[in-house]
Image (tube, coloured by chain):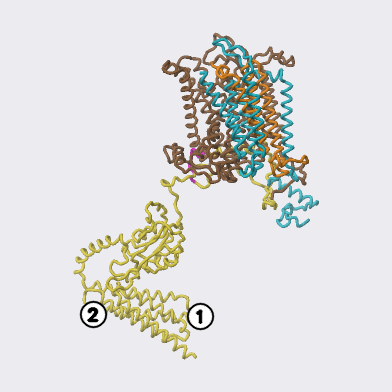
């Protein structure tokens, strides 16, 4: 049974994850729309997950730590998305905007 | 399939090509099976609902109207494909595909018969749940891409419904995961051998004197890591006959109705309120694609319900035929495939029946039903399922000395487990129904009441 | 399953309307019981629809579908779809006189017709030359049938007119024509109501239609054939009683006419509203006129018998004219004789005389008709004069 | 066979990166969310390629089935903002471009490429490597990672409650609409209260339309 460990070198996977992270970072930094920022953050979390899974698969396939942590990351991402979107909706209700630039006051 | 192809074309082709061809063939067969069933389902739905309404239904095209779906298909093919001017072209185009593809993917892991399994995936149940959730994206795309208020409203309703009913459905399926000790669908029918209620717990006393037509080798009764045993096998040890399986089946089937957008949960396309929901702006083949997606989703969900709770392909005679060996194994496979198909169709008939009988729910009723009734019941059911597994299989050491059932025979333990879970489930059902009742008249706070305008 | 409800009904007004509350005693529904009952009901319908057909309205389950092209429901008599024209089965004569009433009343204006003309004289004939109805624009209101004074246009029950021919739904007279027997079949009671008057009017109109004008196109060949047949048969009995027949006919006609006159006189219509004596006098006058007419007719018949050379209806005609004139005279006399109050009743007398005169002419010849009308007019004038005289003398 | 896997990996990588780039650059925020879904799918496929079946399926279930649906819902609840006239990028977006680009080219790639990864020795031929699956993950959650597992559960609960609290729209009053039967019952009760001494004949309790409008009070 062929496996990815023989077919694809680990640095490739890590480079892919790095690239994905940087793209996500760019999105999170450059978007004005808060939902867009959230999308960028999701991409970054995915990049981290790819890294975790890759390390598990290439380095320690018998130890589930990598997958477990990836699952935790997914959990956190889901929670973050739920709360973040709830906040975006609350902000939208209060100010009729989702632009990060315009939400510049700490007062609710 | 791969093996058959290998033996046929042998070394003529490279091995990977043979594997590829085999997979493609299996895919084709499964898809044609599903589409054939879709055609029959459309016909059957129209005929059956017509009889329920004292009508005849389509009976002109072909014998008994059997060719009506073909005529419809021809009509669909030849219809004009209309895209609203302000619609998002690509999203509008992709939406039906995104809705249909995951539904078709669900069919890949269902064991269609004894030994007729397209793919053995050890996370099959999770896979089905995950993939069916994807079609929500397609609905959302359809609603948003149509640039139509009704479509968007329908899509929002559809997705909200899909997401909220996924939770009771998954929780009900967790019961099966607990009982089976795994998420593979392939093992489920094998585990539902035996006799009703008791499962495969009535063992053969004398291995030599047991007829292979009545007794078969069961590697495990639910989740048991025990040695293979000879147990009485009528192919009827379906989990639906146990209290845990029954409640799980009810919850799952109701949730499946909602996921498949069947009446009384057809709120997303409530034609009297929002035209056709997310399908409003679709015509011709794109509409047909949604239509197919919906029916195949119902088909797949029925297959899943049948496999998870109704024994899948398990039925009287399958094990006996398989035990006879030789070519009879293929007969057993055919018989088992027929059993599964029959179960799917009975479930589908029930769906039609419900459609004939019940009106559509309101959105708030729908949400109340999922969150206040189905979900608590499913959660209680998981506890019951754990108890069931513990009472039937755990040693006293595993119980930590709390319960000692080591000295009992399997059928006695099964009986105890069934009784205990039955009590728990019935009590829970009564209690949850009671607290969900509308407040009695004596408890009305008249300030809180609003008389509908 | 008849449970009698003992308690009385109360009604309660809610925001959604009035609610009638029936106390059925104690009923407790357990959770899901209503749902199961619904399922049971639906299943019962499903099962019965598989096995039986709904035959009586009292049955609640079973297939009620009527498989249309093969099975049909009986249409009610008053069902109306598109108008048709009627013609007489025997003679092939159309009832339509082209009075243009239907054309005028038609809301979507889909009825078009031209009047027939006598090819010899060029004068209009009470018959229709061509009649068109655009079915595709017809709205099935039935006004044409309502308004037709001759009951010539009726609403049909036929509704399967689909066609792929453009303009294929503009129907001409031949396509519109149906025999009376057809209409009698689809609407027997309706036809029975109007049958007599319609046929009488037709008889009247037929007299004014020369030859085959006014005969339904599809019947022309048949009528011709029949005539030829009749012509072939006629020569045989003709020599046997060459003289007697016409005379006899004239006499019989006169008698019939007298009877008709009598009847008409008896059935004096409304005008005599104010006083019974007037009425009586008028009736008396009428009866006398009728008697006179009868006598005259008898005489005329005799005269005709004497005077007439064998053949055609002309002498009889003469006799009839004579009879009419005499009747008119008699009427005049009667009117003059009539008591003072009879002045009011003069019109009825005229009316009663007129039918007599009208009925007088035999067959279909114009002159006779004219003569009769003349006689009638004279009678009317006489009556009027008498009335005027009475009036004058009263004052 | 290895070539096949390499090709598949490259395809998935291309899908992931292209979708991610589209996600951060397209103007229409709904399109961005849809591209994000495509990227999620690519990542899920990559997990499957790396034989992490459970994780791949969970990725699809949670990210595609839940998170992206949530995002789409949020976008649609805050509409009129994805208009193409609006600038989608911050005014100094090129700085935001320089930072990740520098991070990628100067830090990540050199590190990843030059680091000596201590890969485990390939398993003996004919014997598949022991790969932990769903059951091992479950066992791990119940044993060595029990505390993080519980924390994650609490986190999810907190997130759910928090999301509801934050997004909750306060209405003036939570009300229940009566069914017709209940409405009738309520009328009867009010009627009884208004007439403390019920008249003997039951017909008198029938409510006339004019009375029911409340003119009596």
Residue that mark 1 sits on: C275
| Front in this rendered view, residue B370 or B290 | B290
Rendered location of residue D96, percent (x, y): 66, 34
- Chain B is which colour? brown
Q: Residue at x 62, y 14 (%)?
A: D119
**Real-space Cα distance between discs 1 and 2?**
46 Å
Q: Chain of mark 2?
A: C
> What is the number of the mark on residue C286?
none
Rendered location of residue C236, percent (x, y): 19, 65
> What is the number of the mark on residue C307?
2
Q: Earlier in the sequence, mark 1 or mark 2?
A: 1
| Quadrant assignment, res C295 | bottom left
Residue C49 among magenta residues: yes
Q: Tag 1, which secondary structure? A: loop
Q: Chain of mark 1?
A: C
- Chain A is which colour? orange
* Left or right: where D54 falls relative to C316: right
Chain shown cyan: that is D
């Amino acid at each position: 049974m062929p496996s990815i460990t023989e077919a694809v070198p680990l640095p490739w996977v890590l480079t892919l994850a790095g690239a994905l992270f940087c793209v996500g970072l760019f999105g999170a930094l450059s978007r004005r729309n808060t939902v867009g920022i959230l999308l960028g953050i999701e991409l970054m979390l995915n990049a981290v997950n790819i890294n975790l899974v890759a390390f598990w698969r290439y380095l320690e396939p018998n130890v589930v730590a990598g997958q477990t942590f990836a699952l935790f990351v997914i959990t956190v991402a889901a929670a973050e998305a739920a709360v973040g979107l709830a906040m975006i909706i609350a902000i939208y209700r209060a100010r009729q905007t989702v632009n990060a630039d315009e939400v510049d006051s700490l007062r609710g | 399939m791969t093996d058959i192809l290998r033996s046929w074309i042998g070394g003529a082709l490279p091995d990977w090509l043979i594997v590829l061809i085999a997979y493609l063939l299996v895919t084709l067969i499964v898809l044609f099976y599903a589409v054939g069933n879709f055609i029959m389902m459309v016909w059957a739905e129209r005929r059956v609902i017509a009889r329920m309404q004292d009508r005849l239904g389509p009976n002109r095209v072909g014998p008994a109207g059997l060719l009506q779906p073909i005529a419809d298909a021809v009509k669909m093919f030849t219809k004009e494909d209309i895209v609203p001017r302000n619609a998002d072209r690509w999203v509008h185009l992709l939406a039906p595909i995104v809705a249909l593809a995951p539904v078709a993917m669900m069919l890949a892991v269902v064991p269609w018969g004894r030994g007729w399994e397209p793919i053995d995936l050890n996370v099959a149940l999770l896979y089905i749940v995950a993939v069916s959730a994807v079609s929500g994206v397609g609905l959302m795309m359809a609603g948003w891409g149509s640039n139509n208020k009704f479509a968007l409203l329908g899509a929002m309703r559809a997705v909200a419904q899909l997401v909220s009913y996924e939770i009771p459905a998954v929780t009900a399926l967790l019961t099966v995961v607990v009982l089976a000790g795994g998420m593979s669908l392939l093992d489920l029918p094998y585990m539902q051998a035996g006799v009703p209620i008791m499962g495969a717990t009535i063992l053969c006393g004398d291995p030599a004197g047991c007829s292979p037509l009545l007794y078969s080798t069961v590697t495990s009764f639910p989740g048991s890591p025990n040695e293979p045993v000879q147990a009485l096998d009528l192919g009827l040890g379906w989990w639906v006959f146990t209290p845990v399986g029954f409640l799980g089946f009810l919850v799952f089937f109701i949730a499946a109705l909602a996921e498949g957008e069947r009446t009384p949960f057809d709120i997303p396309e409530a034609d009297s309120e929002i035209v056709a929901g997310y399908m409003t702006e679709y015509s011709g083949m794109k509409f047909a694609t949604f239509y197919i997606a919906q029916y195949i989703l119902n088909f797949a969900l029925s297959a899943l319900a049948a496999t998870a709770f109704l024994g899948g392909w398990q039925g009287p005679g399958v094990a006996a035929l398989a035990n006879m060996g030789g070519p009879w194994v293929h007969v057993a496979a055919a018989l088992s495939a027929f059993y599964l198909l029959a179960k799917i169709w009975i479930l589908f008939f029930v769906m039609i029946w419900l459609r004939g009988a019940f009106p559509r729910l309101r959105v708030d009723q729908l949400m109340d039903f999922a969150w206040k009734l189905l979900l608590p019941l499913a959660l209680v059911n998981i506890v019951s399922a754990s108890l069931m597994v513990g009472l039937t299989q755990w040693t006293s050491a595993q119980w930590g000395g709390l319960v000692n059932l080591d000295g009992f025979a399997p059928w006695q333990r099964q009986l105890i487990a069934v009784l205990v879970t039955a009590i728990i489930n019935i009590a829970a059902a009564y209690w949850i129904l009671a607290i969900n009742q509308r407040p009695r008249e004596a408890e009305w706070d008249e300030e809180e009441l609003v008389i509908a305008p | 399953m008849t449970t009698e409800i003992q308690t009385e009904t109360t009604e309660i007004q809610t925001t959604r309307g009035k609610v009638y509350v029936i106390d059925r005693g104690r009923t407790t529904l357990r959770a899901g019981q209503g749902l199961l009952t619904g399922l049971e009901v639906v299943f019962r319908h499903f099962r019965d629809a598989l096995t039986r057909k709904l035959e009586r309205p009292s049955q609640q389950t079973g297939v009620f579908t009527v498989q249309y092209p093969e099975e049909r429901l009986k249409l009610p008599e008053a069902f109306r779809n598109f108008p048709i024209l009627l013609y007489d089965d025997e003679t092939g004569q159309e009832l339509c006189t082209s009075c243009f009433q239907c054309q005028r009343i038609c809301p979507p204006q889909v009825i078009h017709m031209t009047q027939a003309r006598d090819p010899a004289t060029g004068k209009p004939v009470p018959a229709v030359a061509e009649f068109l109805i655009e079915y595709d624009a017809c709205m099935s209101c039935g006004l044409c049938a309502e308004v037709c004074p001759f009951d010539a246009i009726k609403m049909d029950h036929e509704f399967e007119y689909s066609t792929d021919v453009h303009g294929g739904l503009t129907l001409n007279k031949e396509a519109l024509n149906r025999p009376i027997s057809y209409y009698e079949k689809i609407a027997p009671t309706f036809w029975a109501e109007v049958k007599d008057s319609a046929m009488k009017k037709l008889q009247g109109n037929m007299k004014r239609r020369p030859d085959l004008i006014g005969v339904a196109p599809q019947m022309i060949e048949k009528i011709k054939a029949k005539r030829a047949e009749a012509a072939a048969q006629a020569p045989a009995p003709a020599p046997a009683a060459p003289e007697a027949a016409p005379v006899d006919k004239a006499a019989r006609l006169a008698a019939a006419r007298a009877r008709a006159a009598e009847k008409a006189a008896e059935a004096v219509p409304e005008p005599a509203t104010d006083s019974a004596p007037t009425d009586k006098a008028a009736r008396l006058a009428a009866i006398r006129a009728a008697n006179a007419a009868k006598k005259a007719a008898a005489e005329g018949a005799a005269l005709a018998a004497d005077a007439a050379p064998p053949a055609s209806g002309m002498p009889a005609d003469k006799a009839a004219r004579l009879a009419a004139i005499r009747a008119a005279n008699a009427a005049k006399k009667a009117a003059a004789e009539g008591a003072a109050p009879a002045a009011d009743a003069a019109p009825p007398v005229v009316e009663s005389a007129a039918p007599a005169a009208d009925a007088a002419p035999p067959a279909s010849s114009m002159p006779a008709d004219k003569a009769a009308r003349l006689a009638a007019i004279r009678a009317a004038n006489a009556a009027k004069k008498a009335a005027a005289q009475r009036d004058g003398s009263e004052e | 066979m290895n070539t096949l896997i390499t090709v598949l990996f490259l395809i998935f990588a291309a899908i992931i990166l292209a979708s991610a780039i589209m996600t951060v650059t397209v103007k229409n925020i709904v399109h961005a969310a849809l591209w994000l879904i495509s990227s999620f799918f690519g990542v899920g496929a990559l997990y499957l390629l790396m034989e992490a079946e459970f994780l791949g399926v969970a990725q699809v279930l949670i990210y595609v089935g839940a998170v992206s649906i949530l995002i789409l819902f949020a976008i649609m609840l805050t509409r009129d903002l994805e208009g193409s006239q609006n600038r989608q990028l911050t005014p100094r977006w090129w700085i935001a471009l320089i930072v990740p680009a520098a991070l990628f080219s100067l830090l990540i790639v050199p590190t990843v490429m030059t680091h000596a990864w201590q890969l485990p020795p390939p398993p003996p031929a004919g014997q598949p490597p022991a790969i932990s699956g769903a059951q091992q993950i479950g066992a791990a959650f119940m044993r060595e990672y029990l505390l993080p597992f519980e924390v994650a559960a609490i986190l999810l609960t907190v997130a759910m409650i928090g999301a509801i609290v934050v997004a909750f729209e306060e209405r003036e009053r939570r009300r229940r609409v009566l069914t017709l039967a209940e409405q009738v019952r309520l009328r009867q009760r009010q009627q009884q209260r208004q007439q403390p001494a019920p008249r003997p004949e039951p017909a008198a309790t029938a409510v006339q339309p004019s009375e029911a409008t409340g003119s009596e009070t």
